[in-house]
Image (spheres, grey):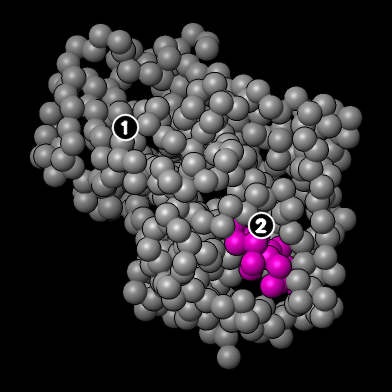
Amino acid sequence: GVFWVFFAGGGARAGQHDDPKVSDMSASVAGARENPIVSPMDQVKWPRLTHDNPGFGILGAIYRHQNPEDCNSAKYLVWRLPTSKNDARNIGALYSTIQVWLAYAYMTGRILVIDGTNWKLTDSRCEKRSPECYFRPVSACAPPINPTSKKYFKNSKKLHEEHTKKDIQVVEFEGAWWPMIATHPFQMSVPREDGTWQQIEAVCKPKAATDWSVAAMQYMWRPTTDSEILINDVLGKLQPSLKVDPERTIAMPVRASDKCFGHKIEKSAHGEEVCITLENYMEIADKIKARDPKVDTIIFTSESKKMVEDSKKYANQGKFKFVYNTVDIMQGTGSTNEDTLKLGGSRSLGIQSALISLHLQLRAKYFIVPYFPRRQRPYSSWLHAIGILSRSPDLTFTDETYLIDAHRHKFYSSKCSEVEIIDEHSKPNGFGPLA
């Protein structure tokens, strides 16, 4: 019951960006051309947004806000990544932060621009050396070289006090945190498919998979053309359409290694939680199968080689088919300080393999994620991102998905209300609590 995948190998608006070119992708591009993809399951499912097709709902409102027709008269909020050698920010933690800054930019009428030149998770394989190596720019606009006025902050409280000064054209901020007002409810005017607009109240809660978080993460993680080609190439070789029926599939992204209390991984950050054991994960999988007997497949990914190897004993039992991302370099830690990055070798390949795992996981119906009761979200921002994106019908392959809190055994349907997601004491949705 194990399936393996083998891997080979500006317009008129000011400041418009093109996709970065990654120098080592020629083999992948050639492979993609030689093996045309047929099934939607075997290619990236991530709708592209354009000025002619900007989308609807919160996602459409974000795109329109970030990509106005006139960049020159716009006001900007530039967020610069922290420069600390101990705060390199892996993609989960990075974009959990950026989604809050995006909310703050929207609330204050500014276009968010990311200065990613401090980011350490790229290498010579990418020219830009920023998150734009993997994701499309958060805006097609760029701040003017000579703005009418500009102010720089390193204290988020001070920024909050002065954010109402609309005469400042460019506000710059460098630091790890955000103004707390960014997590308060705010009003949005969102476009409907019938051409009308609707006024709604949105809220950005970094610890919960709110409607804003789902739309913001989907917007920010739009893959570049090169990233899409790479992922399509791998998915085309795996052919999940022949091996995975989403209605019968569990996503099991496991975060272990340095995330766990008591780990012995040198140079990594201290552990943050009591990690759920593989046996615990499989107990939940068994309970899902008891409720939904047709379930027979698990997509299993982890940064820990040991967890992947240990999972194979369950694959050999025959109850579930296991699908793995064998492109994953499984670096054995999620810590991204200077020491672990030196030990890890290629930085770009680590991100690329993680993104392939993400797209593979999105072909499931049930998503087991250890949401810790005290925090309402996983300690792992990466698992939180997968949980958030599992709620988007644009990215998944079933009419309804379920996010399962592995600590409290609660199901959250992708169709449940935002109140149920935010309130940790709400009654379970969908199947209800597992026995």
**Residue placed at 31% from the left, 32% from the top?**
80
Whole-percent x, y for residue 266 in the image: 45, 58
What is the number of the mark on residue 361? 2
**Residue placed at 42% from the left, 50% from the top?**
93
Q: Amino acid at mark 2?
A: Gln
Whole-percent x, y for residue 337 in the image: 40, 46
Marks 2,1: beta carbons within 8 A? no
Whole-percent x, y for residue 186 in the image: 28, 48
**Residue placed at 55% from the left, 45% from the top?**
344
81 falls in the magenta region: no
Label 1 SS = strand
What is the number of the mark on residue 358? none
In space, the residues marked 2 and 1 are separated at their CA atoms by 31 Å
Q: The N terminus appears in which quarter of the rendering?
A: bottom right
Closer to the camera in the image, 215 or 171: 171
* Stretch in magenta: 294-311
Residue located farthest toward the bottom when viewing the structure as drawn: 435
Image quadrant assignment for residue 53: top right
Q: Amino acid at mark 1?
A: Arg
Vertical placement of residue 388 versus 95, above or below: below
- Between marks 2 and 1 in the image, the one whose residue lies nearer the viewer: 1
Vertical placement of residue 7 versus 141, above or below: below
Q: Which residue is mark 1?
A: 80
